[in-house]
Image (tube, grey):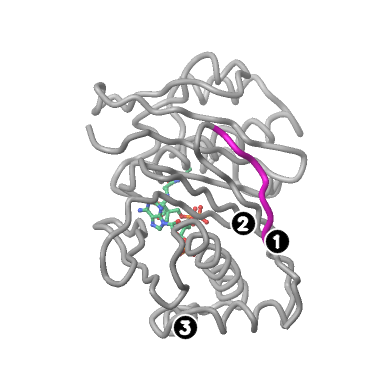
Amino acid sequence: MTNDRWWAPWSETEGASVLHVDLTPDPDREARAVSLLDDAEKSRRNRFLSARARREFALCRAALRISLSQRLGCAGRALSFDCLEHGKPFARVDGRRVEAAFNVSHSGRHGLIAIAEHGCLGVDVEERVAQRDLEGIGSMVYGPLERRLLGTAAGGDRVRLFYRLWSMKEALIKALGTGFSLSPSRFEIPGPMLRGARSGVFRFPHLPSQEWRLLDLGERRFAAALAYKLPCGG
Ligand SMILES: CC(C)(COP(=O)(O)OP(=O)(O)OC[C@H]1O[C@@H](n2cnc3c(N)ncnc32)[C@H](O)[C@@H]1OP(=O)(O)O)[C@@H](O)C(=O)NCCC(=O)NCCS
């Protein structure tokens, strides 16, 4: 076994650490990652139909396992994962739910894992794919101000803006944990962030008492965002 790790610290902010996971196809790494998974995770991996989905899951979950067990000071075999109502994963150590918050995202060659001591976290990474039906998808996920802004951009700027907004909205949905039960067109990114600010405060229209921090973490290789609330709860 070599010391080769496929994940590394990538961004640190107000108590939340974000790791980058290298998802480049590599059969040796993937075999090593699979060997770190428990039986439930191995059978979940085997149910994915595409090699890409199997790779993303195994490399990210193994990196999450090691990072989280180091942070919690527990053995990897003591750690298990379960899901909330809409599929958001949480961790247990020796069967007891832990306070530590985490969230995972993968897109193409890149995965991100956000971890914090407590609270609610959502992270999203999106490789920018210019060939997608941006118009059609945009009409379903963006609100009126966001669509108007997208209408003013063209070419590469439009693709960058599309994925920037997408990653921020997805990070917020993932932080909340409701998945597809909340339509992304029902809320909009705050004005200053629409105009280019890299961080801001956000409130879901149906949950006005909850204040979320939103960070645009996008860079040359991908769009990315982190949303969090410390502590969790109302
Ligand atoms: C899971 C979901 C939240 C994100 O899916 P995705 O974009 O395909 O995937 P990502 O790579 O960003 O994230 C997947 C990871 O999120 C985590 N996850 C699963 N369900 C989740 C939920 N309800 N909330 C938060 N995280 C969740 C899991 O760790 C999963 O990875 P794993 O299966 O390897 O453990 C998706 O079900 C969803 O509902 N997306 C939002 C809907 C939408 O319309 N978005 C458009 C852009 S605004």
The location of residue 46, given as percent across then percent down, is: 48, 84
Horizontally, is 81 left or right of 157 in the view?
left
Q: Which residues are magenta?
A: 7-13
| Residue at figure coordinates x 53%, y 46% from the top left | 124
Q: Give the image quarter of residue 25.
A: bottom right
Residue 111: image tag: 2
Label 2 close to label 1 by CB (< 8 Å) = yes
Q: In terms of secondary structure, where does tag 1 sit?
A: strand
Q: Residue at image x 30%, y 38%?
A: 232
Name the residue carrying label 3: 42
Classify mark 3: residues with Cα within 10 Å, few (<14), some (14-19) or many (20+).
Answer: some
Three-letter residue code for mark 1:
Asp
Q: Quadrant of residue 30?
A: bottom right
Estimate how packed mark 1 is, as few (under 14), some (14 to 19) or many (20 or more) residues with alpha carbons within 10 Å. Answer: many
Identify residue for label 1.
22
Say what amino acid the circle numbered 2 marks: Gly
Q: Secondary structure at mark 3?
A: helix
Which image quarter is the C terminus in? top left
- Assign a secondary structure to mark 2: strand
On screen, 214 above or below 122?
above
Q: Is residue 202 magenta?
A: no
Residue 173 location in percent, x, y? 39, 41
From the viewer's perspective, is residue 73 above or below residue 38? above
Whole-percent x, y for residue 226 in the image: 52, 38
Give above or below for 21 relative to 221.
Answer: below
Please identify the dominant SS of the magenta region: strand
* Mark 2 lies within 8 Å of ligand 1 (Cβ measured): yes
